[in-house]
Amino acid sequence: MTVDKFQIDRQENGSAIKLHLRGELDLAAAAAFREALESVVYSADRELTLDLEKLAYIDSTGIGILVSAVKTRDKLKASLYVTNIPPKIKRLFDMTGISPYLNEGAKGGK
């Protein structure tokens, strides 16, 4: 079994930023995720989308960073969409109670 190294691909298109997350988002990758989000989360005039299609795993640290970004964007009244959530990660979001706070799909869809 191989472990998928965590990667973030950034795509910008006009007033929108999309971060494609890939691999395993765990404690070891948390700093990279936090840094990528901090560079865009305060850009309230830009739509932010997190595409999770190729995310294989997320632990509580990654979820905590995601929740922090959701709260920050909410305070700024800025959009944050989460798209292409794999079923096993969606179940985890449901179990932890964060699903209602995620703007799934919407403008940031495929």
Image (cartoon, helix red, strand yellow):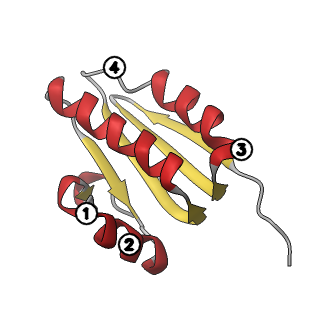
Q: Say few, some or many: other residues with alpha carbon within 10 Å of mark 1 (under 14 / 14 to 19 / 20 or more).
A: some
Kind of residue at badge 3: Ala
Q: Are marks 4 and 3 in contact (CB under 8 Å)?
A: no
Task: State the separation of the CA atoms marked 3 and 2.
Answer: 22 Å
Q: Nearer the viewer, residue 30 or 50?
A: 30
Q: Is residue 110 left or right of residue 6?
A: left
The residue indicated by pointer 4 is: 42
Q: Residue 81, labelled with which disc?
A: none
Residue 97 lies, in percent from the top left, at 25, 63
The residue indicated by pointer 3 is: 28
Up the image or down, 92 lies above or below 108; here it is: below
Q: Residue 99, labelled with which disc?
A: 1
Q: Say few, some or many: other residues with alpha carbon within 10 Å of mark 4 (under 14 / 14 to 19 / 20 or more).
A: some
**If you read the primary sequence from the N terminus, does the residue marked by circle 3 or circle 1 appear first?**
3
Q: Nearer the viewer, mark 3 or mark 2?
A: 3
Residue 67: which quarter of the image? top left
Judged from the image, the secondary structure of the residue bearing numbered disc 4 is: loop
Kind of residue at badge 1: Ser
Q: Are marks 3 and 1 in contact (CB under 8 Å)?
A: no
Task: State the separation of the CA atoms marked 2 and 1.
Answer: 8 Å
**If you read the primary sequence from the N terminus, does the residue marked by circle 3 or circle 2 appear first?**
3
Name of the residue lying farthest toward the right: 1
Residue 26 lies, in percent from the top left, at 63, 52
Kind of residue at badge 2: Lys
Residue 100 lies, in percent from the top left, at 17, 61
Q: Nearer the viewer, mark 4 or mark 2?
A: 2
Task: State the separation of the CA atoms marked 4 and 3.
Answer: 24 Å
Residue at 54 percent of width and 58 percent of height? 59
Q: Are marks 2 and 1 in contact (CB under 8 Å)?
A: yes
Residue at 50 percent of width and 43 percent of height? 19
Residue 30: which quarter of the image? top right
The residue indicated by pointer 2 is: 90
